[in-house]
Amino acid sequence: MCCLETHKTHAFERIERVVEQFSTATDDEIKQITSRIECFRGVAAQLDAESNKVIELEVKREAGNSIRRSATPKCIHGWSLKF
């Protein structure tokens, strides 16, 4: 956009108006970026929580397997029970 009124071959606009349009456009883009960052943070927090759940379940599963391997119950007759 040109700010010289005497130029007739292209669009003319007052400097104040161009600055206002540019400022508004920049503000709109910043709002969009901020919104996307907030969305990303929400998704990242959700993924982190899900990851922690998976890790916790895996630790519990491994602990259970370890307990089962180390404590093989015996029958009255002395036979081992396998799980």
Image (cartoon, rainbow, N blue to C red):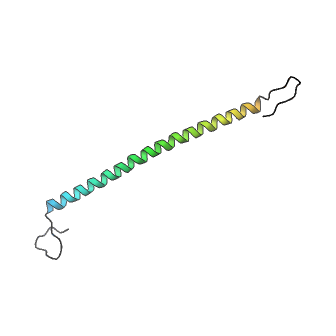
**Residue 36: horizontal and vertical position, in percent?**
38, 50
The single residue placed furthest to the right in the displayed view is 77
On the picture, is 74 further left or further right than 32? right
Quadrant for residue 20, please give it.
bottom left
**Residue 63: horizontal and vertical position, in percent?**
68, 33
Residue shown at 58% from the left, 40% from the top = 54
Position of the N terminus by quadrant? bottom left
Residue sitting nearer the eye, 21 or 15: 21
On the picture, is 63 further left or further right than 74? left
On the picture, is 2 further left or further right than 83? left
How many numbered circles are shown?
0
Residue shown at 22% from the left, 59% from the top = 22
The single residue placed furthest to the top in the displayed view is 76
The single residue placed furthest to the left in the displayed view is 6
Quadrant for residue 23, please give it.
bottom left
**Residue 35: horizontal and vertical position, in percent?**
35, 49
**Residue 34: horizontal and vertical position, in percent?**
34, 49
Position of the C terminus by quadrant? top right
Residue shown at 48% from the left, 42% from the top = 46
Residue sitting nearer the eye, 47 or 4: 47
Residue shown at 82% from the left, 31% from the top = 81
Q: Using the image, determine if residue 7 lies above or below residue 34.
A: below
The single residue placed furthest to the bottom in the displayed view is 9
On the picture, is 66 further left or further right than 57? right
Q: Using the image, determine if residue 78 lies above or below residue 66.
A: above
